Amino acid sequence: MPTRTTPWPSGTPCWIDLGTPDSDAARSFYAAVLDWTYRDTGPDSGGYLFCLKDGHEAAGLGPQQDPADPPRWTTYFATDDADATAARVTEAGGTVLAPPMDVGPAGRMAIVADPQGSPFGLWQAGTTTGVQVVNEPGALAWNEAAVDDPAAAQEFYTAVFGFAWEEIPDAGGYSTFATGDRPLGGLGGVVEGLPRGWSNAFSVADTDEAVRAVETGGGKVLMPAEDTPYGRVAVVTDPWGAAFTVMQEPAG
């Protein structure tokens, strides 16, 4: 299993975390679906946990900071300077929801939203560099946004992160973004019945088994498992409504 312990390049989706109204029950749910274990981040962390896959940091989980917000997974983008990136968000028409702040020695973070209201995070690495494992069962595999105006969203994210875009043929206007040669994620229009804003996909060994674990644990299926050119994919929610995707790599 390849792992990473150095900071991710700026503009890369580098971390994800879940805000949930029931952290204890969420631990059990995601352990069953993604085979996670957990590590406390310290007595002053407010109950925030690292989600571990085979001992490597794969995500974060903790209580909702604002009970009025819906439970959700948040995508964080790597940055070398959280303050400068937050300023670019504002200049490009976005909103700073939580201004840049230090998280002890772990790093510096901010929560912002694009002009269409999709929240996301910024992470300037300290001792916590981001996810340590990707593209393995139980780990982050992809991040994407569903928005009402994809063209306007592309302009915003290009202004903030310098993304280049490539439209995928026959994909309904869906495009991938990159800062180098490799796609980092995707953006497209809203699909009825599926989540708006930023969402993340986890790699799993067997999508159908993962869906069964979701349903057994009290979650819901928004899009049943289907085969795609990128693998077998399903969109689900946990019991509190936080949506995510599970995807199994194509055979062969």
Image: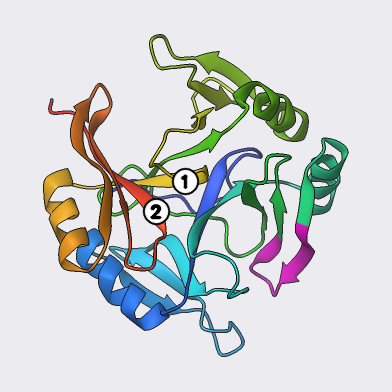
Q: Nearer the viewer, residue 75 or 20?
A: 20
Q: Is residue 73 left or right of residue 124?
A: left
Confirm or deny contact between disc 2 and disc 1 (CB under 8 A): yes
Q: Which residue is mark 1?
A: 199
Q: Nearer the viewer, residue 58 or 241?
A: 241
Q: Residue at x 23, y 30 (%)?
A: 231
Q: Can you give x and y, in whole percent of width and height, for residue 36 in the image?
A: 29, 66
Q: Looking at the image, which residue sits at the far front?
A: 192
> Is residue 206 something that shows in the picture?
no
> Is residue 157 something that shows in the picture?
yes
Amino acid under disc 1:
Ser
Q: Secondary structure at mark 1?
A: strand
Amino acid under disc 2:
Ala
Q: Residue at x 27, y 75 (%)?
A: 28
Q: Which residue is mark 2?
A: 243
Q: Residue at x 28, y 54 (%)?
A: 138
Residue 99 inside the magenta-drawn segment: yes
Q: In this picture, which residue range is highlighted in magenta?
A: 97-109
Q: Can you give x and y, in whole percent of width and height, for residue 89 in the image?
A: 79, 42
Q: Can you give x and y, in whole percent of width and height, for residue 237 in the image?
A: 33, 56
